Structure formats: structure tokens, C-alpha cells
Image (cartoon, rainbow, N blue to C red):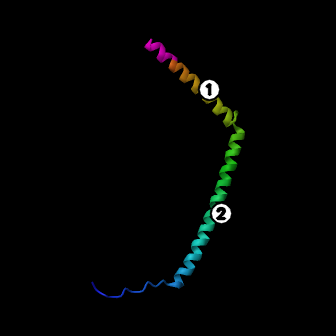
């Protein structure tokens, strides 16, 4: 084993400080962009839903009923086939 000393880890503060500032500014701008994009998407979704003939909940209810009917018919056909 050698007893050599390790070199000191030195950070260039002249580069680090502006880098950290730019990092925080970029992060803040990213959040602003994400918020604006989310607001635009939400507004577009609301406008699209207003233009639908049926509300999404009515469509889901109708599809759930169709699914139940299909399962019932399939189950009945399977039972009739095996009898």
C-alpha cells in the first residue's frame, strides 16, 4: 500500500455558479411550459367533449351494458353448446 495523498477535488466556482443559475432558470421555464401545455390540452379536451353527441360517461355506460350483454350471450351459447 502506498501512502500517497490524493489530489484535491476543486470545483471551478466561476463556471459552477452561472451553471446552477441557468439550471434553475431552465427548470422554472420547463415548469411554465408544462403548465401552459397542460392548460391548452385541458381546454382542447373540454371543447372536444362539448362537441360530442353523448357525454363520455353516457358512452361508457352504453359500452358497459353492451359488454354485459355480450358476456351473457357468450355464456348462454357456451352452456347450450355443452348441454
Q: Residue furthest right?
A: 50
Magenta span dominant secondary structure: helix
- Say which residue label 2 marks: 32
Q: Residue furthest top?
A: 83
Label 1 neighbourhood size at 10 Å, few (<14), some (14-19), many (20+)?
Answer: few
Describe the element under mark 2 as helix, strand or loop.
helix
First along the sequence among labels 1 and 2: 2
Residue 73, how many percent across, how many down?
54, 19
Residue 14, how many percent across, how many down?
53, 85
Queried whether the magenta region covers residue 16, the answer comes back as: no
Task: Compare residues 38 and 62 and report the one nearer the observer.
Answer: 62
Residue 78, how many percent across, how many down?
47, 17
Describe the element under mark 1 as helix, strand or loop.
helix
Residue that appears at 58% across and 25% down: 68
- Say which residue label 1 marks: 65
For the C terminus, the quadrant is top left
Residue that appears at 62% across and 26% down: 65
Label 2 neighbourhood size at 10 Å, few (<14), some (14-19), many (20+)?
Answer: few
Task: Compare residues 17 and 37 and report the one nearer the observer.
Answer: 17
Residue that appears at 66% across and 36% down: 56
Is 54 positioned to the left or the right of 10 in the image?
right
Tag on residue 48? none
Magenta part of the chain:
76-83
Amino acid at each position: 500500500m502506498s501512502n500517497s495523498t490524493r489530489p484535491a477535488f476543486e470545483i471551478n466556482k466561476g463556471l459552477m455558479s452561472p451553471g446552477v443559475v441557468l439550471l434553475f432558470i431552465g427548470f422554472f421555464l420547463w415548469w411554465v411550459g408544462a403548465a401552459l401545455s397542460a392548460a391548452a390540452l385541458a381546454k382542447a379536451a373540454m371543447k372536444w367533449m362539448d362537441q360530442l353527441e353523448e357525454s363520455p360517461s353516457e358512452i361508457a355506460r352504453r359500452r358497459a351494458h353492451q359488454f354485459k350483454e355480450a358476456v351473457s350471450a357468450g355464456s348462454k351459447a357456451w352452456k347450450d353448446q355443452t348441454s
